[in-house]
Image: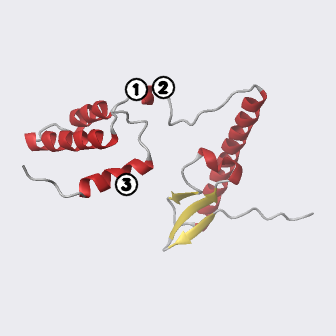
């Protein structure tokens, strides 16, 4: 009989256990991070090992399904778009996002809250030259910071 040792995907930090797996390189384009770390709610090493094995098994099955999706979509000539670019998110503007923010967070706030948030969005739209939330890029943040850092001309 040959003994095969299963890989260990958990570790102990200050008496608590964590599950940790690196995302395979062929699937990294689908995720925003390179590693998955999850708190395991136990102080028992044997329970942590069982939980880590179960999580690892589920993760492997999930990754296999993603790989199969990629293979089948190539066979059929389909292009899979990133999930963040859905049809509903394309129609969202900065003004719409501000209205949603006011509706969710504005209850009981003073007029200063509304005025300052409207001013911030107005500055952003003036700097970017558009109102589309989905067409914002990381480089736009630097351009916005530079435009706001210039001294204000007092009238």
Q: How many marks?
A: 3
Residue for point 11% across, 39% down? 108
Q: Please tell me whether residue 92 is drawn above or below residue 30 in the rendered image.
A: above
Residue 57 badge: none
Q: Please tell me whether residue 58 is drawn above or below residue 75 in the rendered image.
A: below
Q: Which residue is mark 2?
A: 87
* Rendered image quadrant of residue 49: bottom right
In-image side of 124 versus 50 (left or right): left
Q: Nearer the viewer, residue 98 or 59?
A: 98
Q: Nearer the viewer, residue 150 or 75?
A: 150
Residue for point 70% across, 48% down? 60
Query: Which secondary structure lies at badge 1?
Result: loop
Q: Residue furthest left?
A: 155
Q: Which residue is mark 1?
A: 91
Measured as percent of width and height from the top left, residue 134 is found at: 43, 36
Residue for point 54% across, 65% down? 17
């Amino acid at each position: 009989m040959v003994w095969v040792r299963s890989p260990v995907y958990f570790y102990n930090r200050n008496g608590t256990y964590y599950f940790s797996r690196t995302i395979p390189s062929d699937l990294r384009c689908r995720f925003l991070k390179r590693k998955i770390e999850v708190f395991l709610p136990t102080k028992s090493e044997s329970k942590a090992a069982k939980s880590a094995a179960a999580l690892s098994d589920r993760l492997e099955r999930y990754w296999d399904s993603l790989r199969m999706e990629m293979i089948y979509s190539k066979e059929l000539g389909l292009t899979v778009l990133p999930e963040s670019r859905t049809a509903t998110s394309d129609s969202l503007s900065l003004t719409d996002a501000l209205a949603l923010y006011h509706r969710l967070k504005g209850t009981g706030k003073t007029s200063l809250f509304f005025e300052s948030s409207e001013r911030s969005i107005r500055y952003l739209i003036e700097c970017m030259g558009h109102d589309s939330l989905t067409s914002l890029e990381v480089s736009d943040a630097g351009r916005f910071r530079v435009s706001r850092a210039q001294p204000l001309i007092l009238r």
